[in-house]
Image: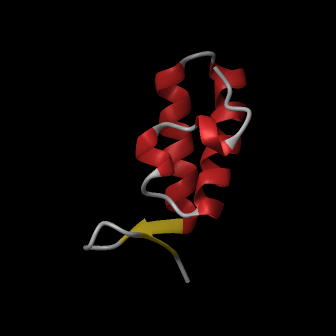
Amino acid sequence: MPYNSLNELPEAVKDHLPHHAQEIFKEAFNSASEEYKEEETAFKVAWSAVKKKYKKESDGKWVEKH
């Protein structure tokens, strides 16, 4: 099930990731969903894509890597 907008993303994504990270998640999820046809795999790919550019701080906030 591809996401058409950021508003459709799961709460865990919308409530915790910055806007740009949400865009990365959505694009990676949609691409992986089309390629692998399995939602679980698409979620893993999407989180991996986010973690390439962002990291989770000790306070739980996601920040862009520098």
Question: Residue 23 at x, y = what percent?
Answer: 67, 52
The image quadrant that residue 26 belongs to is: top right
Name the residue: 48% across, 47% down: 13
Locate residue 37, reporting x and y percent. 63, 16
Residue located farthest toward the bottom when viewing the structure as drawn: 66
Q: Position of residue 44 (x, y in %)?
A: 48, 37
Q: Is residue 32 left or right of residue 40?
A: right
Q: Residue at x 65, y 52 (%)?
A: 24
Q: How many marks?
A: 0
Q: By what rule are the colours in the image chosen?
A: secondary structure
Give 34 or 9, whichever is nearer the viewer. Answer: 9
Q: Based on the displayed image, in which of its 4 quarters is residue 53 positioned? A: bottom right
Q: Nearer the viewer, residue 33 or 59?
A: 59
Q: Nearer the viewer, residue 41 or 20?
A: 20
Q: Name which residue lies at 54% across and 64% down.
A: 18
Work out whether 66 lies above or below 33: below
Q: Quadrant of residue 16?
A: bottom left
- For image coordinates 50% across by 34% down, the residue present is 43
Tell me the quarter of the image containing the C terminus: bottom right
User: Seen from this angle, which residue lies furthest left?
Assistant: 58
Residue most extreme to the front: 7
Figure check: 24 above or below 35: below
Report x, y in % for residue 1: 63, 19
